[in-house]
Amino acid sequence: MFGPEFERKVDAIVARYPVPKAAVLPVLWGVQHHRGWIDAESEKWVAGRLGVSAAHVHGVVTFYTMYKQKPSGKYHIQVCTTLSCMLRGSDELLGHLERRLNIKPGEKTPDERFSLVRVECLGSCGSAPMLQLNDDYHEDLTLEKVDKLLDNLP
Amino acid sequence: MDKILTRNIHKENSQSIDVYESGGGYEAMRKALKSLNPGEVTEQVKKSGLRGRGGAGFPTGLKWSFMPKEKSKPHYLLVNADESEPGTFKDRLLMEKEPHLVIEGSMISAYAMQADICFVYIRGEFVYPARVMQAAIDEAYRKGYAGRNILGSGWDCELILHIGAGAYICGEETALMSSLEGDRGYPRVKPPFPAQSGVWGMPTTINNVETLACVPSIIERGPEWFASVGPNEKNSGPKLYCLSGHVKRPGVYEAPMGLPLMELIHELGGGMLHDDRPLKACIPGGSSVPVLTAEQCDVNLDFDSLAAVGSMLGSAGIMVMDSSTCMVNALLRISHFYSHESCGQCTPCRQGTGWLERILTRIENGQGRIADVDLLKSVADNIDGNTICALGEAAAWPVQSFVKKFRPEFEAHVEAGKCVILDAAPSGA
């Protein structure tokens, strides 16, 4: 389903653990990196490959917040609004992004360029407010800084 | 005190093994493997007074001593790098800037427990720290600090980075084991304790990143030195304090155990963010520990001093709130967090955390009833002590302490139907 190179990666992951089931999370990460999100077909494939039920894999995918059950935007923006960030203006930051992108948290722009979510503490409390854009943290933000960040995206 | 945990962070390429070794790095590991047997390493850690830096403050050497002395099965050390307690961001700094200190501490500890594999469980959001850690692990293998026959000792131990996928609960040690096994992150009932039956049913110990990062200094400078840093041997060693909220210079600060909270806020942290807004409240150990009123903040940041004022050092995530803070809104944010993060196994927590969030939401939105203030306490009291893991307490303690200490503000908020910012109840009662 994902090609021989991916199969070799899965073999290497499985070899790290005493039992194949331990590879469920890392292999799901591999799937998500490969195709951007995790659909039911992929869940079934992972289940078959690791000798667990598809229901088990679905249970894992839905338990953890980072597995995407639908494709996100090209730029996936996660804004932390937990207490330390709230105290430093994360609500204003999120409100600004909602207005600028004209979407609510949990939504995607019609051109699929941006998706926006409100998330819980990302461990960046000393550099609040902050957001995670795809893999990267952007910290000590102001509304001007976040505008500049978005303006300069390719 | 010279810096122990953050010795290299301002050096260029502090994450590289060359920089780490040139500052004396891996000498402690060499000393441990060449001149101490595993039991002696554990004894030194016991003597140092080191207590866990992840939240509970359990004596580290004692925890290690629960591992079987004779090996009949594989042993595992799990490095808890799932740092997720709101207000806490110290392990991330260590992994980004001092990854080899974390690795050296982990490998010395793995040696003490004769572990076969050391897994570093890092939260999925930490993409950059994970990249730095993986590069450091690869360097450690190349230099013979992990793998087969480590430093010629005859001891083999693999070092493997395992990436989580977004779940606060996986920082709870038994949930971390479930997650590592490829399951949902469900905590398990103790006993059996992990040292008897842990991951895959094998003897397992789980330690926090900062806890393990303390170990090289204990071996290098001796347990007596470590015990002498800080107020007493039960509250000892260098400590990382995470300062956030309404202060001028938030960040991670290293200082001896027992740093006065007011010194952290006003000297290291540069004082309150706005000069005309005094301190109102402070959460000293990550969002799950009981809040302190301003007048309770004249306290030292160590396990026993904070216990004496009814709170905890926890993960040393110090969240500072000034006089502009609405305590209803602040508590709502905390309760939303625990409701979102409850794993759903135990009814009191799964249901109760949702109730707390909904009651606080209606108070915040001006639809509260005066009886809601007591209802909050009642729901929290019914979660506290009735769950498999400590997430139940983590959800209950903030509610109990906010309502107790800021009750007039909660009542005024209900009556006015909007934020009414008041000071703490007299004498913090």
Image: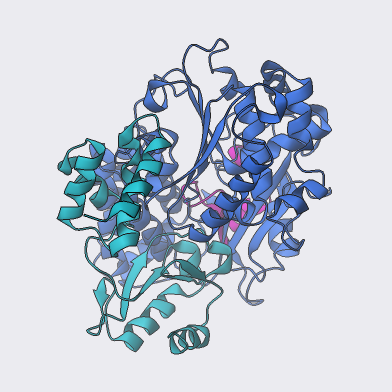
Q: Is residue A110 left or right of residue B429?
A: left
Q: Which residues are magenta?
A: B280-307
Residue B421 in the image: above or below residue B265: below
Q: Residue at horizontal 45%, vertical 89%?
A: A151
Q: Colour of chain A?
A: cyan
The question of residue B303 being in magenta is answered with yes
Q: Does the segment drawn in magenta span residue A67?
A: no
Residue appearing at x 51%, y 58% in the figure: A123
Residue sitting at x 25%, y 77%: A108
Horizontally, residue B144 falls left or right of residue A94, namely right
Identified at 33% across, 76% down, the residue is A74
Chain B drawn colour: blue
Residue B68 is situated, as x and y percent measured from the top left of the image, at 53, 13
Q: Is residue B133 visible?
A: yes
Residue B151: name its quadrant: top right
The vertical placement of B252 against B136, above or below, is below
What is the x, y in percent for residue B286? 52, 50
In the rendered view, how is the structure colored? by chain
- Can residue B325 be spotted in the picture? no
Q: Nearer the viewer, residue B105 or B247?
A: B105
Where is residue B205? Give x, y as percent. Answer: 51, 28
The image shows a total of numbered marks equal to 0
Left-right relation of B30 to A66: right
Q: In this orientation, which residue lies closer to the viewer: B315 or B145?
A: B145
